[in-house]
Structures are given as C-alpha cells and as structure tokens.
Image (cartoon, rainbow, N blue to C red):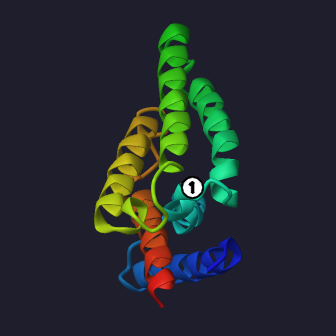
C-alpha cells in the first residue's frame, strides 16, 4: 500500500477512535484533538520509515529539524542553555533514528510488535516532556491516537 492509502486508513482510524471516545463520554480538548490527528497521521506512515525512498523517510529529516526548533521555543522561557541542549539532543536522536531505521529490512522490526511498542514508548515520553511546558496537553490521549495510527498501518499491510 502506498502512503496515500495509509493516510486514508489513518484518517478513518482517527475518526473511528474519536467517535468511540465521544460515545464513551471521554471529551478531548481541541489541542489534544489537533495534535492527536497529526500524531495519528505520522503513526499511520511511521512503519515505512524503513524504506529509504518513502515520503515519510524523506520528510522525517525536515520534521526532526522543525521539531527541534519548536521544542527550543517551547522550553526557552525556562532557561536558554537547557532549551538549547534538550532540543539539540532530541533533534539528533530523531535524525539518527530516521537514518538507522532506513538500514532495516522492510516489513521487519517496524512492522512487528516490538517496533509498535518502541513507537508508543517514544511518543509517550516525548509528549510527557512537552507536557511540562504545555499543561493542557494529554500525553496519554495523543499517544493513543498515535498507537491507533501505527496499528492501522500494520493491519492495512496485512489486508
């Protein structure tokens, strides 16, 4: 399946999860809905980071760079040096992750439960770091959307 198909399945997954949470009387703020949508879309493409020619792989370098810049401006109010160090370290980790994921065999690690678990842990930790500076953010809700997007990719590939 190509990236358009995975994004389409990711959008459907996001909407189904959002409706399910609504029916369970779990209200989600606009901020968490917006971030959850983008994390779900990223999750729906993330297993294909192991394909060097994939759109998600190519765009992830730019995404890592802008994530570092956004983190810097989010954290800079606390301390300039701390913000610079944290954003630089996370940007380097993201760059290296994207680089090394492209070295893996397609439909290997990233398409198995171990890749899914690592993705969920990384997303949860990342958004807990951001929650320190954005109190209205719910890392658990955002991670739930990301996890559903990731699973939608794996299920779509099997179908």
Q: Residues within 10 Å of mark 1 (few under 14, many from 20)?
A: few
The residue lying toward the viewer, choosing from 155 and 26, is 155
Residue 12 image position (x, y, % from top left): 58, 83
Q: Please, what secondary structure does the residue beneath circle 1 have? A: helix
Q: Quadrant of the N terminus?
A: bottom right
* Residue sitting at x 46%, y 79%: 17
Is residue 62 left or right of 6 when viewed as pictured? right
Residue 31 image position (x, y, % from top left): 57, 55
Toward the bottom, the furthest residue is 159
* Residue sitting at x 45%, y 68%: 107
* Residue sitting at x 53%, y 65%: 40
Q: Mark 1 points at which residue?
A: 31
Residue 16 image position (x, y, % from top left): 50, 84
The residue lying toward the viewer, choosing from 25 and 81, is 81
Residue 124 image position (x, y, % from top left): 36, 49
Total marks in image: 1
* Residue sitting at x 46%, y 59%: 105
Q: In this view, does 98 lie above or below 25?
A: above
């Amino acid at each position: 399946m190509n990236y358009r198909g995975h994004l389409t399945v990711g959008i459907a997954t996001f909407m189904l999860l959002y409706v399910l949470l609504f029916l369970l009387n779990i209200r989600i703020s606009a901020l968490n809905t917006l971030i959850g949508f983008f994390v779900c879309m990223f999750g729906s493409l993330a297993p294909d980071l192991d394909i060097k020619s994939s759109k998600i792989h190519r765009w992830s370098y730019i995404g890592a760079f802008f994530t570092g810049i956004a983190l810097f401006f989010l954290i800079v109010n606390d301390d300039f040096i701390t913000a610079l160090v944290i954003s630089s370290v996370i940007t380097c980790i993201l760059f290296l992750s994207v680089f090394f994921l492209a070295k893996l065999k397609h439909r290997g690690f990233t398409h198995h439960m171990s890749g899914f678990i690592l993705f969920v842990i990384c997303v949860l930790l990342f958004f807990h770091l951001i929650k320190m500076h954005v109190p209205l953010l719910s890392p658990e809700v955002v991670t739930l959307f990301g996890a559903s997007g990731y699973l939608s990719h794996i299920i779509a590939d099997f179908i």
